Amino acid sequence: MLHVHPLFLQPDQLAHLTMSQDHLSIWNNCLEVIKDNISSQAYKTWFAPIKALKLENKVLTIQVPSQFFYEWLEEHYIQLLSKTIHKELGPDARLEYSIIMENAGATGTNQASPYAVKMPMANRQATQNPAVPLSAGIHNTPIKNPFVIPGLRKLNIDSNLNANYNFGQFIEGECNRLARSAGFAVANKPGGTSFNPLLIYGSTGLGKTHLAHAIGLEIKERNPELTVLYVSSEKFTHQFIDAVRNNSVNDFSHFYQMVDVLLIDDVQFFSGKEKTQDVFFHIFNHLHQTGKQIVLTSDKPPVEMQGMEQRLLSRFKWGLSADLQVPSLETRMAILEKMMYADGIELPREVVEYLAYSITSNVRELEGALISLIAQSSLNKKAITLDLAKQMIDKFVKNTAREVSIDYIQKVVCDYFDLPLELLKSKTRKREIVQARQIAMYFSKKMTKSSLANIGLHCGGKDHATVLHACRTVNNLQETDKHFRKYLEDLEKKLAIH
């Protein structure tokens, strides 16, 4: 390979060489600043996937994975991006986005947009499939309504929405912020955002159905003229089977095609049902092409769905797939307090904390535990105390192999050493804090199935090597220091009682 010394290059060649080297280092410098100003989870979600493409005339071009990424960055991180770019390149610097478009399986690049100017909505919608007018017969001919009786007109369709599942009752936390924000954006402009369809996925009891209803209710509130329909995948399948039996498949398809907003719950149950998938594929295409909003829920992301047609899975990926994760301790406590406020009841703080620490798997179990506790108190005419809560929790989860949570371990350790939880998760190197932190890591590794990386994340963002070192240190100390061994014995008893 021929190596040319920069001194022998022409000015334009030298500029090109500098540009190709600089855009990566400039963006890496920006990322270092950004990393210090946002949470590690937010950084991994919104900045780790970005690629720096080029730097020309103080215009840095970055590539983002989707239109939704661009809109989210513009709405939530524009000030941070602006400051970091200006810091690196000066006050006249600009940032442009290159957006990968995935519609219809094609990958291309959207026009770059300077960060200081929002891409007009007209431009955004130009990247979607063009609107196709509805067939004339759909609105003018009476359609058989599979929910009630034949002959109902469009405006008579019942949305099947639960008024209790609204946005006001949906507690926001780090575990669901992306899905809730996307859902609220869809509710504000159904069919007018780049996340169509919106696929909300997560394990049982984390709020998928609640969020789907909330989107539908908000749309009805803002746009009463729109036809909004919520239906479970099981109901949809049964209606289709009835339509086949009654030779009314066309009516069935036309009914769903006249809906403005379609919300389908548990779409994974279409798996293995080829005919149902086929009819849904055509309904999906029609709604999407005519600018109607589609919201789906599932217990897994499209990439993990088995027994689904590839053409359907590819359409699920056209918009945004947002996950709901297990709620954090703070979110679980907020959910309990919201329920208590709605029911007009008060519980001792220690009882609320114990419930939040003990029930970690999903929101539905958390609500069930609170209802059971109130019922126990009412039926037995007993005051709600921590002892009653412990008895109830033991019965409530007696048939499941229960695992103590990292949050609860940290609380017990902090209470034992009389330390605030924030200090345990801080970066302080004070001996007593470090020791308590190491003990919390040790019990987390011993009593949970969490990975070393996850344990470190709970202890102030430490890496797996730090957790491993902490466990070795605790093992060594308990063999050589009798006072330290007593700490561990006391704490193990307290955690075993849990």
Image: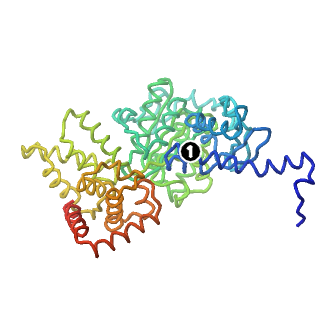
Residue 465: image location, x then y, percent: 47, 66
Is residue 84 positioned above or below 464 on the image? Answer: above
Residue 317: image location, x then y, percent: 59, 49
Q: Quadrant of the C terminus?
A: bottom left
Front position in the image: 227 or 266: 266
Q: Secondary structure at mark 1?
A: strand
Residue 404 as seen in the image, left or right of residue 55: left
Is residue 423 positioned above or below 216 on the image? Answer: below
Is residue 351 positioned above or below 226 on the image? Answer: below
Q: Quadrant of the N terminus?
A: bottom right
Seen at 36% across and 66% down, the residue is 445
Seen at 35% across and 62% down, the residue is 438
Residue 190 as seen in the image, left or right of residue 28: left
Q: Residue furthest bottom?
A: 479
Residue 168 as seen in the image, left or right of residue 61: left
- Count all numbered tags in the image, as a single digit: 1
Front position in the image: 367 or 439: 439
Front position in the image: 202 or 429: 429
Q: Residue furthest left?
A: 381
Front position in the image: 192 or 494: 494
Judge the density around disc 1: few (<14), some (14-19), many (≥20) Cα neighbours within 10 Å.
many
Q: How is the image coloured?
A: rainbow
Residue 202: image location, x then y, percent: 44, 51
Residue 245 seen anywhere in this rendered image of the structure: no
Residue 450 seen anywhere in this rendered image of the structure: yes
When asked about the image quadrant of residue 452, the answer is bottom left
Residue 217: image location, x then y, percent: 42, 31
Seen at 75% across and 49% down, the residue is 22
Task: Specify the amino acid type for callout 1.
Answer: Leu
Q: Which residue is mark 1?
A: 320
Q: Residue furthest front?
A: 430
Is residue 234 positioned above or below 341 on the image? Answer: below
